Image (cartoon, rainbow, N blue to C red):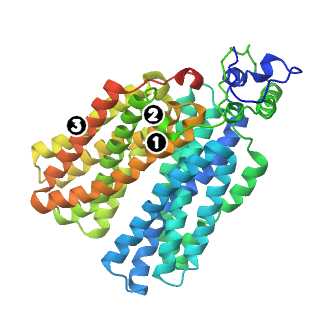
């Protein structure tokens, strides 16, 4: 059955199969075609993460060069987050109207060109403006990219395919500091921003290499274009010697316009509130812990700065193997179960630190790393899970608005730690993070929707 609400009529010269876009996508096995798309988009996402943290490598030099105050440094860091919030709304709205690939090209070009603007900045004010505008592009890229990858992938093992793409963001975050440590002392603070211009080339490649999402095209009533894209993928699949089984019949609802208010409408309210809570809890814990660990190691256990930074970075590294493992098991155990169990397991070491009140610094280091090993991968899983909860017409904007809670949590978390350390000891900080992790576990366990192995169109009926 094909549900048609757009004014464009179905061409009588084409068969129903030409318009069974979702059904045909669901029968196509993963091939090198999909891997190539994931590689192109993933490269852009890597540099998105790199550009987001490039400032941290340049700041030690800029503080001395421009005689920056603590307030100016804080404003400069916050400016990127402010731009990201604006970009999440703006590009989320744009991608649902002009298409995923075009929106990706625009925001990649924007944050790449602003990286060049940062490198050429002669003073604090210019750099501040460039970082705000760059943040707009950074804030829009990952939600659109995650939604695009989701829409090209069939339900079977979709979690594995998308999470293997999401890992590049985590790797980009990890490598940003190491690359900055190599480039800045040798080539100057501008070098990390110049490197961030590379995605501008990727945006040009996208224009020639990436097709528009056929699900988005069908949702806009542009069935001929959607059929052409799916036919291209089918032909590649056959040339690769892979089989194409009969396509299941999946209804397509063509809706030319959507309203953001639908996210809080009766149909999606529970999903929206539960996933917003999930984003807030996951990032409140992960960003808060990682941001404050070096300070706690220095002030409480009297580590020297280099040791504190190295140990804290090691705590982040342990989540990378878990990210890979999660990609291979999340389709089997389910999204909701992972978040419920993962956040609960992440809370246990934090509660242990609070209860033990230990002065054994190595035990605290190990327990903090164990906690991050379970909470860290949930950051990537949020980008898999959220696009699955909404129909094509709301997928990007729903995911983009959810990431706003990431920015809010990333701002409130470190601030809350500072307040607690002012009036209490470090153990109370870990207790707070444990409680927030458990809240996320309970909320998603009770109210979350399971999406594993389910067709996107079935989820949004």
* Residue underneath mark 1: 380
Residue, far front: 7
Query: Residue 418: where, in percent of width, then height?
Result: 21, 61
The answer to whether one can see residue 302 in this image is: no
Disc sitting over residue 353 in the figure: none
Compare marks 2 and 1 and give the one earlier in the sequence. 2
Q: Quadrant of the C terminus?
A: top right
Q: Cα distance, mark 2 to mark 1?
A: 10 Å
Residue at image mark 3: 348
Q: Position of residue 250 (x, y in %)?
A: 66, 18
The reply to whether dot 2 and dot 1 touch (C-beta < 8 Å) is yes
Residue 298 location, x and y as percent? Answer: 22, 65
- Residue at 55 percent across and 77 percent down: it is 190
For numbered disc 1, what is the local secondary structure?
Answer: helix
Asked if residue 57 is positioned above or below residue 460 in the image, the reply reads: below
Q: In this orientation, does residue 273 appear?
A: yes
Q: Secondary structure at mark 3?
A: helix
Instruction: Determine the CA span between mark 1 and mark 3.
Output: 21 Å
Q: Earlier in the sequence, mark 2 or mark 3?
A: 2
Q: Which mark is residue 326?
A: 2
């Amino acid at each position: 059955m094909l549900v048609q609400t757009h004014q464009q009529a179905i061409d009588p010269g084409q068969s129903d199969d030409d318009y069974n876009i979702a059904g045909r996508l669901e029968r196509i096995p993963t091939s090198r075609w999909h891997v190539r798309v994931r590689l192109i988009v993933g490269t852009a996402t890597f540099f998105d993460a790199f550009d987001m943290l490039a400032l941290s490598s340049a700041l030690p030099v800029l503080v001395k060069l421009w005689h920056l105050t603590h307030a100016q440094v804080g404003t400069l860091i916050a400016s990127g987050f402010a731009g990201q919030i604006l970009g999440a709304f703006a590009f989320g709205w744009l991608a649902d109207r002009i298409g995923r690939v075009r929106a990706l090209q625009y925001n990649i070009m924007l944050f790449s060109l602003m990286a060049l603007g940062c490198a050429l900045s002669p003073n604090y004010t210019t750099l501040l403006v460039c970082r705000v505008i760059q943040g707009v592009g950074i804030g829009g890229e990952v939600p659109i990219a995650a939604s695009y990858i989701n829409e090209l992938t069939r339900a079977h093992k979709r979690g594995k395919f998308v999470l293997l793409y999401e890992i590049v963001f985590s790797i980009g975050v990890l490598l940003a500091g190491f690359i900055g440590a190599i480039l800045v002392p040798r080539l100057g603070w501008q070098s990390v921003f110049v490197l961030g211009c590379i995605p501008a080339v990727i945006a040009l490649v996208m224009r020639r290499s990436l097709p528009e999402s056929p699900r988005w095209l069908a949702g806009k009533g542009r069935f001929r274009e959607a059929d052409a894209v799916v036919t291209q993928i089918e032909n590649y699949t056959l040339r690769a010697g892979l089989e194409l089984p009969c396509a299941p019949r999946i209804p397509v609802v063509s809706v030319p316009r959507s309203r953001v208010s639908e996210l809080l409408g009766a149909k999606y309210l529970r999903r929206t509130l539960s996933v917003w809570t999930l984003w807030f809890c996951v990032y409140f814990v992960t960003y808060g812990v990682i941001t404050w660990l070096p300070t706690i190691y220095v002030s409480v256990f009297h580590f020297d700065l280099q040791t504190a930074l190295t140990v804290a970075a090691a705590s982040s590294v342990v989540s990378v193997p878990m990210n890979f493992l999660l990609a291979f098991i999340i389709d089997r155990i389910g999204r909701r179960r992972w978040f419920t169990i993962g956040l609960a397991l992440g809370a246990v070491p934090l509660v242990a630190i609070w209860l033990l009140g230990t002065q054994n610094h190595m035990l605290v280091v190990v327990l903090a790393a164990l906690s991050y090993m379970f909470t860290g991968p949930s950051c990537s899983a949020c980008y898999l899970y959220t696009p699955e909860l909404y129909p094509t017409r709301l997928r990007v904007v729903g995911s983009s608005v959810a990431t706003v809670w990431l920015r809010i949590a990333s701002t409130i978390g470190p601030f809350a730690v500072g307040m607690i350390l002012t009036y209490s000891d470090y153990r109370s900080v870990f207790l707070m993070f444990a409680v927030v992790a458990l809240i996320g576990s309970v909320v998603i366990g009770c109210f979350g929707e399971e999406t594993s192995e389910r067709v996107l169109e079935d989820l949004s009926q």
